[in-house]
Amino acid sequence: MEIPDKGPLQAPIAGKRSAEGPQQSSQVDPDEVPDNDVGRDTIGLTDSGRAFNSAVDQARTLPDVRMDRVMQLKQQLAQGTYRVEGSRIAVNMMDESMENDSVLKHIDTKA
């Protein structure tokens, strides 16, 4: 392999290899590149990615508070008909606790 003493470094032309001295550079004249390709990167989403984005967009349009449910509960409180079901609360608390334990088993909490 011969290393030239002078001149700029030159990149080899893709797919062309030669042991006969320096390679020709593969420079592209900027005037020959179409304007639509200059400085642009593109990405594409899969069908599942587009479906996910659509679902996220739909979720963002939903209100944070369900006003119909709030009004229903306010009415029940005002009428004295709202009843707390202790057993239902206890079951939900236990379910959530078990879910948390399951998640924590998969996370390194000692780090």
Image (spheres, rainbow, N blue to C red):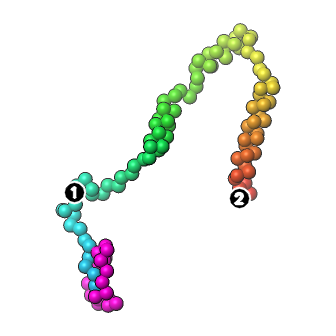
Disc number placed over residue 111 in the picture, else none: 2
Quarter occupied by residue 84: top right
Residue position marked by numbered label 1 in the rendering:
34
The residue most toward the left is 31
Q: How many marks?
A: 2
Task: Tell me the kind of residue under disc 2.
Answer: Ala
Q: Main secondary structure of the magenta part?
A: loop
* Position in image of residue 1 (x %, y %): 34, 90
* Position in image of residue 72 (x %, y %): 64, 15
Segment colored magenta? 1-20
Q: Residue at x 71, y 59 (%)?
A: 111
Quarter occupied by residue 96: top right
Q: Is residue 28 magenta?
A: no
Above/below status of 98 relative to 62? below
Q: Residues within 10 Å of mark 1 (few under 14, many from 20)?
A: few
Task: Tell me the kind of residue under disc 1.
Answer: Pro
Q: Residues within 10 Å of mark 2 (few under 14, many from 20)?
A: few
